Image: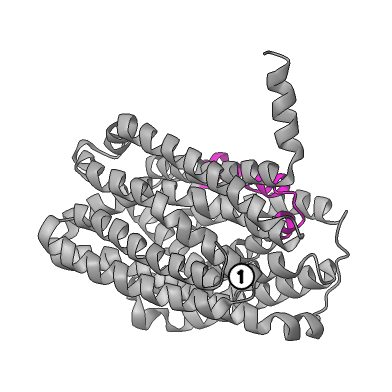
């Protein structure tokens, strides 16, 4: 038994799907844990105002980054095997970096109109650090996706592991206030890139050029995924505003913590499905890969649901005893992950088949179902109603997905 165990583990790790799935899942765990520790340390070292400003800066940078990616993150995986990987990486890296700066400059120029509290960004020092931070954050997705596309997600994990350097850097940069929080993360990105680019250099030739051929090949696919990603993001960005307007700020805080913890379960199918995407692009047996990912996803989700059932209240209590009231929401969101997994795996199959228009249709339905049901159930059941909305919305969507799969003879 002792001999069979290591041999079995070695056999699984030699399978690129299982190996990449492991590192992708560990990536999600690492990001969640280090993010929690980073902000916990920041709240103990920095003033409430500095932390508040930094959170707003980071949220703004993440929003800008989502616009700047323009779907290149998905196109990298889809075309890395069939096109010149160096041209794909160089083109994606340069354009995402340029787009992030352009959108960032526009954001800074108009910030006093739509967010006066962040007008400090128009001061030269703040503007420069904000733009550098935004660019570093945006291109991180490009480097991570390149490693995943090469079926070597361990380097993506190493990249995120190096970013934990931002936590100890919070202390020496304390004198900078809110800029210290941003600068700590930016310096960590620089260190990570020095090492990451060393590894990338083994597989990619760096050249400062944009390949028009890749853009012609991928622009429809990239733009379609960009639109679908924006719809998806909008779906879940509206709910906190609805909670605030319907139930008030106290309930909004409870919802945010319950959703944040429960959302970890939804990250499981997202992480594992990326491995399925890569294997499909490399021509592996799709039906076999789907079965493997399906079993892995269900196993990981069930384990997570059981874990939250026993320890969810304790985790929520770490934010304050009042947040335990969000336990039911946390559990419902976790359970909805089982239905959500069907949607995630199906969208991956659509991307492999280049049927991006159907992903947009699905995300339009998702937007309408989740937000309409959330509004209705918030009035009736409070924040727990959002959990009911998730389960019903994903259930309805899964019925439509099964209809399409049967129609196209995918089952």
Task: Say which of 161 and 223 sits in front.
Answer: 223
Task: Give the quarter of the figure containing the N terminus.
Answer: top right
In this view, the residue in front, 387 or 168, is 387
At x 20%, y 52%, the residue is 384
Q: Position of residue 198 (x, y in %)?
A: 83, 51
Q: Where is residue 307 in the image (x, y as percent from the top left)?
A: 38, 32
**Magenta region's main secondary structure?**
helix
Q: Is residue 169 visible?
A: no
**How far across and down, in percent of the image, does residue 261 sit?**
37, 45
**Circle 1 Cα neighbour tier, 10 Å, few/some/many (<14 / 14–19 / ≥20):** many
Left or right relative to 268: residue 374: left
Residue 165 sits inside the magenta stretch:
yes
* Image quadrant assignment for residue 205: bottom right
Could you tell me if residue 75 is visible in this image? yes
* Residue drawn at x 47%, y 83% as measured from the top left: 109
Query: Which is nearer the eye, 44 or 16?
Result: 16
Q: Find residue 234 and report its horizontal and vertical position in percent.
A: 39, 72
* Residues rendered magenta in the picture: 146-173
Q: Name the residue under label 1.
A: 351
Secondary structure category for the residue under label 1: helix
Residue 56 among those drawn in magenta: no
**Residue at screen point 37% across, 74% down:** 365
């Amino acid at each position: 038994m002792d001999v069979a165990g290591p041999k079995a583990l070695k056999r699984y790790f030699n399978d690129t799907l299982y190996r990449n799935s492991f590192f992708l899942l560990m990536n999600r765990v690492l990001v969640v844990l280090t993010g929690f520790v980073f902000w916990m340390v920041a709240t103990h070292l920095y003033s409430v105002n500095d932390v508040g400003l930094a959170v707003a800066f980071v949220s703004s940078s993440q929003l800008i980054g989502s616009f700047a990616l323009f779907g290149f993150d998905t196109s990298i995986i889809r075309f890395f095997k069939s096109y010149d990987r160096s041209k794909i990486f160089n083109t994606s890296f340069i354009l995402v970096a340029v787009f992030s700066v352009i959108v960032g400059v526009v954001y800074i120029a108009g910030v006093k109109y739509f967010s006066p509290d962040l007008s400090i960004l128009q001061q030269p020092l703040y503007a420069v650090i904000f733009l550098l931070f935004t660019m570093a954050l945006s291109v991180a997705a490009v480097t991570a996706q390149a490693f995943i596309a090469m079926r070597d997600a361990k380097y993506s994990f190493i990249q995120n592991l190096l970013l934990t350097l931002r936590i100890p850097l919070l202390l020496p940069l304390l004198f900078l206030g809110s800029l210290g929080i941003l600068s700590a993360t930016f310096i960590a990105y620089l260190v990570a890139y020095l090492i990451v680019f060393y590894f990338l250099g083994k597989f990619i030739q760096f050249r400062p050029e944009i390949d028009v051929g890749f853009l012609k090949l991928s622009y429809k696919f990239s733009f379609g995924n960009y639109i679908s990603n924006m719809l998806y993001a909008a779906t879940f960005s509206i709910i906190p505003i609805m909670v605030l307007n319907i139930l008030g700020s106290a309930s909004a805080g409870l919802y945010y913590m319950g959703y944040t913890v429960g959302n970890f379960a939804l990250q499981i199918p997202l992480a594992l499905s990326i491995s399925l995407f890569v294997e499909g692009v490399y021509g592996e047996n799709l039906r076999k890969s789907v079965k493997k990912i399906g079993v892995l996803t269900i196993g990981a989700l069930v384990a997570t649901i059981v874990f939250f059932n026993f320890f969810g209240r304790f985790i929520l209590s770490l934010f304050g005893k009042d947040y335990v009231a969000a336990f039911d929401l946390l559990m419902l969101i976790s359970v909805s992950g089982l239905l959500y997994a069907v949607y995630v795996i199906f969208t991956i199959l659509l991307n492999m088949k280049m049927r991006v228009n159907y992903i947009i249709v699905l995300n339009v339905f998702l937007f309408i179902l989740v937000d309409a049901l959330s509004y209705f159930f918030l009035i009736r059941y409070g924040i727990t109603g959002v959990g009911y909305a998730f389960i019903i919305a994903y259930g309805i969507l899964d019925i439509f997905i099964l209809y399409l799969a049967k129609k196209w003879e995918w089952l």
